[in-house]
Image: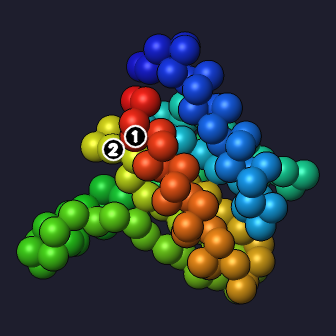
Amino acid sequence: MLAPQLITKLDQRLAKLLEDCSVINAAVVTTADGHMCAMRQGNQDYPLERLATMGSTLMSLGDTITAELKMGTCDNIISENKQGIVAFMHINNNLVLVTLTVQKNALGMLLSHSRRCAEEMAQFV
């Protein structure tokens, strides 16, 4: 389990992420084993607890696939859907950042802001 001070810092950084990038509707930090550490969402009500579990599982699968194909590490996984985009990316070996948008044309914004957020989180975890 993460220290309360670290969880507070993660939560504050997620708040800044949603503030800085209006296209992001929700963001979650989860452990590699699926336990949610921090979450933020806009006006929508998403099942973020379940998203945390699925996000860690999906990143683990991505890591296994890229290792099997000898393609290095899995940096992120993108799920493009009819009603939006979900991005999954490693913060470090133990934490995963999951972000989502309902705007189909916002992939670049979602990835760039999420990547910057994950890199900043990696520095203080």
Helix, strand or loop status at disc 1: helix
Vertical side of 99 occupied by 108: above or below: below
Vertical side of 115 occupied by 119: above or below: above
**Residue 45 image position (x, y, % from top left):** 83, 51
Colour theme? rainbow
Q: Which residue is mark 2?
A: 92
Instruction: Give the mark toward the camera: 1 or 2.
Output: 1
**Residue 32 image position (x, y, % from top left):** 36, 42
Indicate left or right for 59 with 36 as reference. Answer: left
**Residue 64 vs residue 20, the one in the foreground:** 20
Specify few, some or many for label 1: CA neighbours under 10 Å numbering under 14, 14-19, or 20 or more.
Answer: some
Vertical side of 33 occupied by 20: above or below: below
Amino acid type of the residue tagged 2 in the rendering: Asn
Q: Which residue is mark 1?
A: 122
**The N terminus - image quarter:** top left
Q: What residue sits 43% from the left and 30% below the top?
A: 124
